[in-house]
Amino acid sequence: MSTYMPKAGDITRKWYVIDAEGKTLGKVAAAAASILRGKHKTTFAPHADCGDNVVIINAAKVVLTGKKLQQKKYYRHTGYIGHLKEVSYATLMRTKPEFVVEKAVKGMLPNNVIGRNAARRLRVYRDANHKQTAQKPEVWTV
């Protein structure tokens, strides 16, 4: 008996939509990362990019547990000396909730070519309206 090796031509990509309203950020991100990698499929192989496309809606209504909304910070550096910028997650959730969800999902993907290609198949929207209705995405429950 031989091990199944998926090939690029054999992979069929489906579309899934995840509603993040009232759900915790980590659970939504973990479910999306698992779908993007293709771990829900029986033909999953860790060396092949066999994941599906994911649309996350209602990103502004995602929940952070505990005091994370006030205490958790996002850091970035501009490249200049002493220019470390920090923004609280409360500010990010008000201004760019899509970025918060994208960052959480990307953090759960591998840091290689497979992870970068999987991150390109992620779409995040602030409210319930999305542009992928033509792809007829299936609803994924978290």
Image (spheres, rainbow, N blue to C red):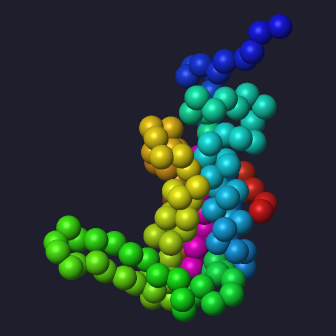
For residue 21, above or below residue 67? above
Q: Quadrant of the N terminus?
A: top right
Q: Is residue 48 magenta?
A: no
The overriding secondary structure of the stretch rendered in magenta is strand
Residue 128 in view here: no
Q: In which quarter of the image is the C terminus?
A: bottom right
Residue at far left of view = 80
Front in this rendered view, residue 84 or 127: 84
Residue at far right of view = 1
For residue 48, above or below residue 78? above
Q: Position of residue 121 (x, y in %)?
A: 51, 47
Q: Where is residue 18 in the image (x, y as percent from the top left)?
A: 68, 61
For residue 135, above or below residue 59? above
Judge left or right: residue 76 versus residue 128. left
Residue 83 in view here: yes
Residue at far front of view = 81
Q: Position of residue 53 (x, y in %)?
A: 59, 46
The residue sitting at 62% across, 52% down in the picture is 33
Q: Position of residue 99 (x, y in %)?
A: 46, 70
For residue 131, above or below residue 136? below
Front in this rendered view, residue 137 or 126: 126
The residue sitting at 28% across, 71% down in the picture is 77
The residue sitting at 63% across, 90% down in the picture is 67
The residue sitting at 66% across, 68% down in the picture is 26
Q: Quadrant of residue 44?
A: top right
Judge left or right: residue 59 versus residue 142. left
Front in this rendered view, residue 19 or 34: 34
Judge left or right: residue 47 versus residue 65. left
Q: Does the magenta stretch include residue 54?
A: yes
Q: Quadrant of residue 55?
A: bottom right
Q: What stretch is highlighted in magenta?
A: 53-60
Residue at far top of view = 1
